Structures are given as structure tokens and as C-alpha cells.
Amino acid sequence: MTVPDTALTCRPPRVAFAGTPEFAAAALAALLAAGHPVPLVLTQPDRPAGRGLKLLPSPVKALALQHGLALAQPRSLRLDGKYPGDAQAAQVALLAAQADVMVVAAYGLILPQWVLDLPPLGCLNIHASLLPRWRGAAPIHRAVEAGDDRTGITLMQMDAGLDTGDMLLLAQEDVRADDSTGSLHDRLALLGARLVVEGLARLGDGRGLARMPQPTEGVSYAHKISKAEGVIDWTEPAAQIERRLRAFDPFPGASFGLDGEAVKLWRARLRPEVCGKPGEVLRAQGSELTVACGEGGLDLLALQRPGGRRLEVAAFLQSLQGRPALLGRVLGSAGN
């Protein structure tokens, strides 16, 4: 089965776009560069950020304003929800946009059925995994955390389920041994941008897109990341801790307790031959800071004290001068 293309006559589809972070902004930029009319952009309301908690626009909003695009920022799209006025205004704007299709990328709001049914070609989602693996909110984080060696982008026809719609296009991307969520995110954002442009080109020239139901096996869920997950448990295997460091970079970071401070650990190297009490500092000299874990150990390479910046290990150890020696101490959880 193919996505219907009867609404188009060899022209670029008119695209309503819904997205919020940098991942989505890459896709919107690619659609504009490819010449797609974008009569309306939906993005989440401005959020407080930084130490001053100043309201800041999302990356998608900033790009939309740069290009003079019509913009809506509803708090909800549910007509019977907590913000019916926002939803009604968004409905009026979407009807006026007369879009052929809606492209959704990391929008952050649930699309109710009236939105899914509105565009003639439906709603297409750029999802950062190879579905059905890692449905849900944090597919990039979870792929790194799990040690996956491959992930990718799925262009999906949205339905009412959580990332359960038919697949339209797939593109694979290797997960490198040193990938953080940040580095993998940047490659997947570009890959997703290319894939959605390819998909809309197929709709515009009449080729259409084949719809492939997702396999029933291999389903997993990428639950939203919580800050509590970033507390390092030294009883876990070193390999698991190291993956989590990369998965939680840049957010929320991983931390341990030292002299009442929550110290963030951003990068470490596996030392499988190391043996000691979990959390025990086995070496702390020069540019070496080795800590035992439940299985093996880690060389801590990049750390950050509260209010400071990321430091390589030698500079971090120098910042602790005047404190009790680390060698032989057992590191705690964050704040302990």
C-alpha cells in the first residue's frame, strides 16, 4: 500500500511543520531549502532557561521567525483538554494553512485524532530509531545506553498509538564506540532531514511511499530520561556506567558524591582488569584517577564540580588541592 498522492499534481507538497528542538530545526531547514511551502509551524511555548530563567524560543521557533513563517505555540492540541482555547486557535490556523501533509519531529505534544485526520496525506513523523526498537521519548539516549551498534531514522505514518504507525522509509546509522547522545543526535538530525526531503519528493512527483507495518517482534520503549538516572551506582559493571555517561551527555549528565558535592563525570575509559571495592579510588595522581566498579573499573577522564566547567582529570585533581587525599577513599552517590 502507498501513501495516496492524488492531492498533488507534480508539485512540492505544502507542509505544516510541528517540532521543537534542534533535531526538528534541522528538518525544517532542509524542507525550506528543498523549496517546500511551509504555511504554518507549530512549536512548544517558550521555556525558561539559563541561570536567569529567561523565556527563550525553541530552535524551531527561532528558525521560523528568521524565515517569516506563520507560527503557533499551543500548550495543548486537545479540544476537550486543559487549554481548549489554544487548541481551537491551532485548529483555525491549521485549517487556514491548507497543508497537504504535516511533518512532525520531536514536537513534544500528543497529536489528537483531529490533527492526524486533517492533512490529506496525513502526518509523517521523523523518529530517531529503527522502529519498532526504541519507541518513545528518548530513542537516542537509550540506544547509546544499551550499547546498540546500529540505529537510524524511521519516517513513519502517524497513527493514534505511541510510535506504532506504518514505516515509510528507513535509514541506518552506526553507533560508534565513543558516541555520546550529543554526537549521535547531530548525525541523526541530518539523516532525518535528508530522509523527510526524500519522502516528500516521492509524494510530490507521484511515486508515493510504500507503507510497511512495523514488526510485532523487537518492540522496546525509550522512556523519558529522568535526572535521578544520572546518579552513578559504583556497584554496577564499569561497562554499563561508561555507556550511561555517554548516553547522558549532554543531558542530564552523570554524577557522584565527593565531600558533599555532586561532581559530574562526563567521560571515562574502561579498565576491565581493575579489582576493588565499588567506588574505591585506586589511583589519584597526575593525570590518572582510577575507580573500581562492580565489575572492572574506570579511568575518570573529564569531570565538573558544581558551578565550574568541564575539566580534564589532571586539572580536576589540582582543583582539589587542600582537601583530603582521594587515594583509598570510596566515592558516594551524588551529594554524599
Image: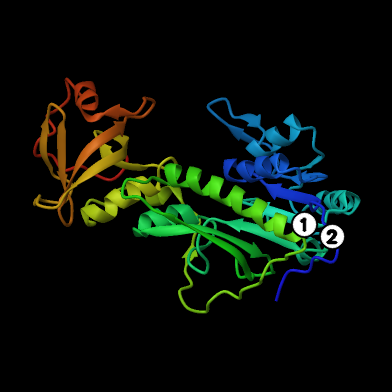
Rounded to the nearest whole Å, what is the CA distance between mark 2 and mark 1? 6 Å
Tell me if residue 183 comes above or below residue 226 in the rendering: above
Q: Do tag 2 and tag 1 residues touch (Cβ < 8 Å)?
A: yes
Residue at x-position 59% and y-position 29%: 53
Q: Position of residue 224 (x, y in %)?
A: 50, 55
Tell me if residue 202 comes above or below residue 320 in the rendering: below
Q: Secondary structure at mark 2?
A: loop
Residue at x-position 36% and y-position 25%: 308
**Picture quadrant where residue 146 is located:** bottom left
Report whether 261 appears left or right of 163: left
Q: Amino acid at mark 1?
A: Gly
Tell me if residue 307 comes above or below residue 175 in the rendering: above
Q: In the rendered image, is residue 336 in sight?
A: no
Instruction: Estimate how packed mark 2 is, as few (under 14), some (14 to 19) or many (20 or more) residues with alpha carbons within 10 Å.
Output: some
Instruction: Estimate how packed mark 1 is, as few (under 14), some (14 to 19) or many (20 or more) residues with alpha carbons within 10 Å.
Output: many
For label 1, the residue is 204
**Picture quadrant where residue 253 is located:** top left
Q: Secondary structure at mark 1?
A: helix
Report whether 295 appears left or right of 48: left
For label 2, the residue is 8
Tell me if residue 186 comes above or below residue 226 in the rendering: above
